[in-house]
Structure formats: structure tokens, C-alpha cells
Image (cartoon, rainbow, N blue to C red):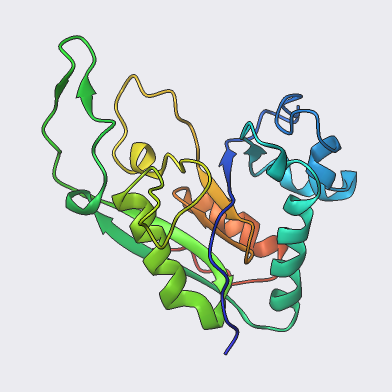
Amino acid sequence: MTEMRSSYLVQRLNPPHGGADNPFAFGGGMKNGGLAEGAMELLRPIFSFDYMGAAEYEFGDVPRAFQKIAEYASEGRAALFGIVIPNSEVDTAHLKDWGSRKKVKVPPGESHVYIICHADWCDEVETRVRAWAAKNWRTREDEHDIRDATNLPARLIPQEDSYWDTIGWLEMDNGFLFFTDADAAEKTAALFGVGDDDELD
């Protein structure tokens, strides 16, 4: 059994920029956060990196996280699976009528989240993802305390005027990924040789 560390850094992943990198994605840190150009060429058609506004994301931790995933995937110990999160379990603090500033009613429904992680971690990763869906922002009392908001709730229950376009997340302390976009999840999994040709449900 491979033990997990606490999660602290979760890098947001946005839709691809049509082949052009966001020049501000990694602030004043390493170019592409330390990722080699060859790796960027593989990732650009799938997703781009959101600017997280903190040095911790900028000085080589991103490629180290991908390396962790590549290592356990090469050992045949990676898993790709989906979970369903009902709207009733999602943090709704972002749901407001911005004209009246009143809370709006939570719509019925559910969302799918697709996870790529070490096979030993499936239950714990699901627990953490569900916790981040239920509480967008970190609290000192929360065992799943992270440095920055995931914005996962705003993707699970979006509003028409929402400016959050995040489609995936890279957890950097252990090395796992999760997505609200099935296509991005499948393509990313394929880069690591994870999963099969069947589409995610």
C-alpha cells in the first residue's frame, strides 16, 4: 500500500489556448513551470495551466508531479475512473443573483468527475475530491486543506455568467489528476498509458 501525503498544492488546468501558451501561467518562475518543451507539446492540445499567483507552483513542482504519475503508471499501478457528485453535495457559495446579490436555488442534477491516480489511492482521492466539491475554499480545520481554491464547485454547477473555465486539476503533493471534462481525462490518461479505448461513462 502506497501511503499518501496531505494535499496542499492543486494546480488548476484550463482548456487549451489553441496552441499558444499563457505567458503569465507561471509568473516569474521557470518557463512552463519547469516542463520540457516536448512535454508541453503533448499537453497543449489537451489543457493549459491557470495562473495560480504563487511561487510554489512555478519552480519545478509541476514536472515533479507529472513524473510521479509517469512512474506509477509505468509500473502498471495507475487507475482511471469516474465518480458522480450530486448537486446537493456541492458548495453553492458561488451561486448568486449578482444583480440582487441573493442566493439562487440549487438546481437538481449531478456531475461526473474523472480521476487518474495510483491504484492504491482510489478511495482516498475520491474522498478528497468530494471534500473540495463540498468546500471550495480551504479552512484551517479541514484535513483536506489546500493553498488555493480549486473552483471545482463553480464547474460542477456553473452559472451562465461564470468566468471560471477550469476543466481539470493536478494535485502536486502526491501526483494525481482529476477532470470534469471526460475527453481531457481520456487524452491525459492515454499519455501515461492508463485506461483503455472505452469511453468513460
* Front in this rendered view, residue 140 or 98: 140
Q: Residue at position x 35%, y 56% from top?
A: 141
Specify the farthest residue to the top: 99
In the image, residue 97 sits, relative to residue 11, either above or below, namely above
Whole-percent x and y of residue 53?
Answer: 63, 31
Report the residue that reaches farthest toward the front: 140
Residue 22 location in percent, x, y?
72, 26
Q: Position of residue 34 (x, y in %)?
A: 84, 46
Q: Is residue 109 left or right of residue 155?
A: left
Q: Residue furthest right?
A: 37
- How many numbered discs sit on the rendered protein? 0
Image quadrant in which the N terminus is located = bottom right
Quick check: 195 above or below 186? below
- Residue 107, placed above or below residue 7: above
Q: Residue at x 75, y 78 (%)?
A: 74
Q: Is residue 164 above or below residue 201?
A: above
Residue 183 at x, y percent in the picture: 53, 51
Q: Residue furthest bottom?
A: 1
Along the line of sight, the residue nearer the viewer: 200 or 98: 98
Apparent side of residue 42 relative to residue 175 in the rendered image (left or right)? right
- Comparing 201 with 192, the one in front is 192
Q: Where the C terminus falls, by quadrant?
A: bottom left
What residue do we see at 47% from left, 48% from top? Answer: 181
Residue at 40% x, 68% y: name it: 126
